[in-house]
Image: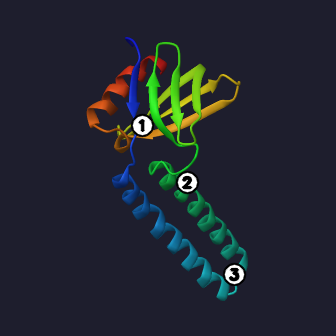
Amino acid sequence: MAGKCRYELTRDRRGVIWDLLLYVPTVVALGSIGLHLWYGGQQGLAYLLYFLASFFTIAGAHRVLGRLLALPGAPVALELDRREIRLDLRNGRQVRLVADLRYYPDYAGKSFGLVGVDQEGRKRQFILHRGQFREPSAFDDARSRLKVFR
């Protein structure tokens, strides 16, 4: 990795649509089946399905709001250096991953994960998606630069 490189992140509206197409029918199906089981006399199984519907609602909301950069802890900029990775968060703070840096690409090549320990000694993890980068070439460039942390 040669020198510093900075990437500004944007909202991933296309990815949000795909996430909504995944999570909304799942939650509706789980809730509907749970409702059917509740009035069918199988309240124990209905509780399980309601729990799963609640879990998928929370996980889906977190993923969608993260892609839209609406969460306070969502990264809005990524800066790569030889020794550390800096992420500017929406709330104005900056996270510097300085130790145990790991880069986890996905098999489809549409996102990657970053894990590391910040200056305060806390383990932090972030997932960045292709649609959050301004150009697809910036995403590919960032992935190639991050391979040293694999």
Q: Secondary structure at mark 1?
A: loop
Which mark is first along the chain, 3 or 1?
Answer: 3
- Indicate whether 136 appears above or below 67: above
The residue that disc 1 covers is 106
At x 42%, y 37%, the residue is 106
- Disc 1, disc 3: CB below 8 Å? no
Q: Nearer the viewer, mark 2 or mark 1?
A: 2
Q: How far from the left and from the top, in percent, is residue 61?
A: 54, 59
Residue occupying the point 38% across, 30% down: 7
* Residue identified by numbered label 2: 62
Up the image or down, 18 lies above or below 90; here it is below
How dense is the environment of label 3, judged by Cα within 10 Å: few (below 14), some, or many (20 and up)? few
Work out how far the residue at label 3 is from the one at label 2, CA to CA, in angstroms: 31 Å
Query: Horizontal and vertical percent for residue 9?
Result: 40, 39
Camera-nearest residue between 87 and 93: 93
Q: Which residue is mark 3?
A: 42
Circle 3: residue type? Gln
Residue type indicated by callout 2: His
Q: Contact (CB < 8 A) between labels 2 and 1?
A: no
Q: Are marks 3 and 2 in contact (CB under 8 Å)?
A: no
Return the disc, 2 or 1, that comes first in the chain's sequence: 2
Query: Which of the numbered marks, if any, corresponds to residue 97?
Result: none
- Above or below 55: residue 46: below
SS label for mark 3: loop
Secondary structure under tag 2 reads helix
Task: Determine the CA span between mark 1 and mark 3.
Answer: 40 Å
Instruction: Kindly report the distance in space between the C-alpha atoms of the residues bearing marks 2 and 1.
Output: 19 Å
Q: Position of residue 30 (x, y in %)?
A: 55, 72
Amino acid type at mark 1? Asp
**Is the image coloured rainbow, by chain, by secondary structure, or in one colour?**
rainbow
Task: Point out the frontmost of discs 3 and 2.
Answer: 2
